[in-house]
Amino acid sequence: MKNIPTWRLVVAGALNDGDGRWLMHRRPFHKHHGGLWEFPGGKVENGENPPFALIRELEEELGISIEADDLVPSRFAHECSQVAENPIVILLYRIAVWAGIPAALEGGEIGWFTPQEIAALDKPPLDIALADRLFEKEAR
């Protein structure tokens, strides 16, 4: 039997400002994928379900509060197990309602971008896939 890798579950939020712009987070340069833009979020910890992990992560990273009912499952992407030793699966949720003003509390920076601007940003491979899938209808 093949050695099956342990997958790591990650959640991310696609925050939409209602004017066609989406929030992206630029990772601090000293971290993995440093300097690249991504949808904000993070790892699902033991004992957490994905929505509550995303609520926790966005409060820690951006200082905003979100209700679980305001998370809309949208897309997912995963690494190939032949490429990564511990591949990840990212679940992306669309978010249009939150309390507070997003700020980059854990380093890096944030910005609001149109789908066309997001396409031009340097992003990690899975965020490229997520953005392509999220905005595919808008590109038609």
Image (cartoon, grey):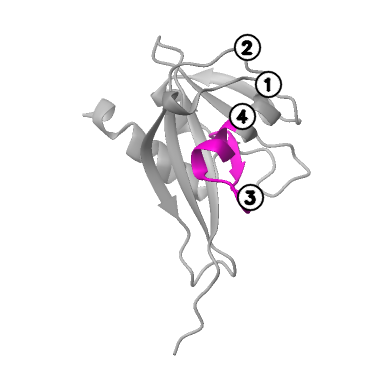
The residue at the far front in this view is 47
Q: Which residue is mark 1?
A: 63
Q: Estimate the x, y position of residue 130 in percent, counting from the top left.
A: 41, 41
Closer to the chain start, of discs 4 and 2, is 4
Amino acid carrying label 1: it is Gly
Q: Which residue is mark 3?
A: 45
Q: Estimate the x, y position of residue 15 in percent, counting from the top left.
A: 48, 23
Kindly check if marks 4 and 3 are in contact, taking CB atoms under 8 A apart as contact. no
Residue at 53%, 53% in the rendered image: 9
For the record, the magenta segment spans: 39-55
The local secondary structure at tag 3 comes to loop
Q: Which residue is mark 4?
A: 58
Closer to the chain start, of discs 1 and 3, is 3
The residue at the far left in this view is 140
The local secondary structure at tag 1 comes to loop
Question: Can you say which quadrant of the picture contains the C terminus?
Answer: top left
* Number of residues whose C-alpha sits closer than 10 Å to that of mark 1, classed few (under 14), some (14–19) or many (20 or more): some
Say whether residue 90 is magenta: no
Say whether residue 51 is magenta: yes
- Disc 4/disc 3 C-alpha distance (Å): 14 Å
Q: Tell me the tag on residue 101.
A: 2
Between 97 and 130, which is closer to the camera in this rendering? Answer: 97
Q: Estimate the x, y position of residue 19 in percent, counting from the top left.
A: 40, 9
